[in-house]
Amino acid sequence: QVQLVESGGGLVQTGGSLRLSCAASGRTFSMYGRAWFRQAPGKEREFVASISWPGGTTNYADSVKGRFTISRDNAKNSVYLQMNSLKPEDTAVYYCAAKRDSSAGSYEGEYMYWGQGTQVTVSS
């Protein structure tokens, strides 16, 4: 069974940092593009960041550029999201996703596999 499992969410104050992790199991994801999306209460899910395989290309939403960094460890089938200088508007459920090609896409429809999400709450 294919699984993506996120971890690392929590409550942090404005200006703080968190590191999200997403571990894949059930099949080999090493050649797949990976991404993070998020969904705030009452809003649609939106793109945050993506990374190609093996990791040479990254894309970021304008709202997180310069603050968030996506990376991957292909030996561990894992992807990470380092989030610095967090703001209250970053509060959301964060989802990791995987797609069946190696590119770093930013459209939700490109991604076939999804995790259950991890809550990130930034207090003001």
Image (tube, helix red, strand yellow):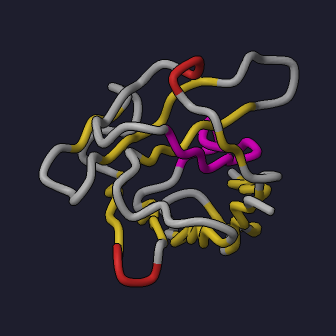
Left or right? Give the position of 37 relative to 104: right
Left or right? Give the position of 19 relative to 30: right
Q: Relative to 17, say whether 87 is above or below.
A: above
Looking at this view, is 91 or 76 the one in front?
A: 76
Q: Quadrant of residue 9?
A: bottom right
Q: Quadrant of residue 102?
A: top left
Q: Relative to 27, say whether 8 is above or below.
A: below
Q: Residue furthest left?
A: 56
Looking at this view, is 63 or 81 the one in front?
A: 81
Q: What's drawn in magenta, residue-wise?
A: 87-99
Instruction: State the image coordinates of residue 90 (x, y, percent, origin top left).
Output: 60, 42
Instruction: State the image coordinates of residue 84 (x, y, percent, origin top left).
Output: 41, 62
The residue positioned 76% from the left and 45% from the top of the image is 93
The residue positioned 22% from the left and 59% from the top of the image is 54
The residue positioned 49% from the left and 69% from the top of the image is 17
Instruction: State the image coordinates of residue 50 (x, y, percent, origin top left).
Output: 37, 41
- Answer whether residue 41 is magenta in the image: no
Q: Residue furthest bottom?
A: 75
Instruction: State the image coordinates of residue 99 (x, y, percent, origin top left).
Output: 49, 38
The residue positioned 51% from the left and 72% from the top of the image is 19
Left or right? Give the position of 27 relative to 34: right
